[in-house]
Amino acid sequence: MIRGKNINLRPFTRQDLEFFQKVANDLDYNGEFNDFGLRNSVELETGFAVEGFLGARQGMLVIVNQEGEILGDMSYHQAAYGPNPGSQVYEIGLSIRPDQRGKGYGVEAQALLAGYFFRTYNVMRVQASTDIENIPEQRALEKAGFTREGVMRKAQWRNGVFHDLVLYSKLRGE
């Protein structure tokens, strides 16, 4: 478990599957910026059975408050800017329950996961991208210590249209 002041990040448990299967296609939970079409909730069961969503290359963590209540989830995956191990980075993303947004949980979760990657892996950067219109997430990334790097034009296909994304990064030591 990665412990924070107000929240913790922890691995999925079998008991979490019911909640996440229920919200797999819930537009309120996923929000307009995480709506990539219908998702097969059976994939959650299969993914959990294979590696518990906790791999070195990609995975998902549950965001919980100090009482253990599920607030959302974080995902991560490796990306590469060259063929050597030193060019590996982690890209992170999150979803927060609608009734828990705006309380700073996303800020803390993103800072916690970036810190974990820097302590655990030999990476120089952790990055995140968000829709150019997702101003609350841009503010959250900046509060979590990420720096805006620029706009990736028409980088994401969502809802039948290509969308511009804003790229943020946090470097080791920042």
Image: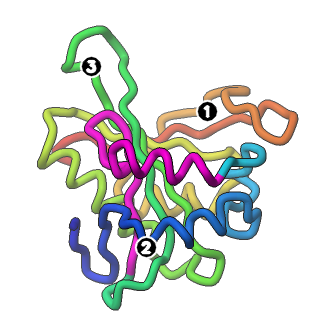
Query: Which of the marked residues, 2 or 3, is nearer the chain's N terminus?
Result: 2
Name the residue at the top extreme: 83
Q: Which residue is mark 1?
A: 151
Q: How is the image coloured?
A: rainbow
Name the residue rendered at 56%, 81% in the picture: 100
Amino acid at pointer 2: Gln
**Cβ–Cβ under 8 Å for marks 2 and 1:** no
Residue 97 to residue 166: above or below: below
Q: Does 62 appear in magenta?
A: yes
Is residue 114 toward the left or the right of residue 41 in the image? left
Task: State the separation of the CA atoms marked 2 and 1.
Answer: 39 Å
Query: Where, quadrant-wise, is the N terminus in this rendering?
Result: bottom left
Task: State the separation of the CA atoms marked 2 and 3.
Answer: 36 Å
Is residue 85 toward the left or the right of residue 163 in the image? left
Q: Does 126 appear in magenta?
A: no
Query: Which of the marked residues, 3 or 1, is nearer the chain's N terminus?
Result: 3
Name the residue at the right extreme: 160
Residue 72 to residue 111: above or below: below
Q: Which residue is mark 2?
A: 15
Report the magenta residues as a range. Answer: 41-64
Q: Which residue is mark 3?
A: 87
**Cβ–Cβ under 8 Å for marks 2 and 3:** no
**10 Å crowding of disc 2: few (<14), some (14-19), many (20+):** few
What secondary structure is found at the residue carrying circle 3? helix
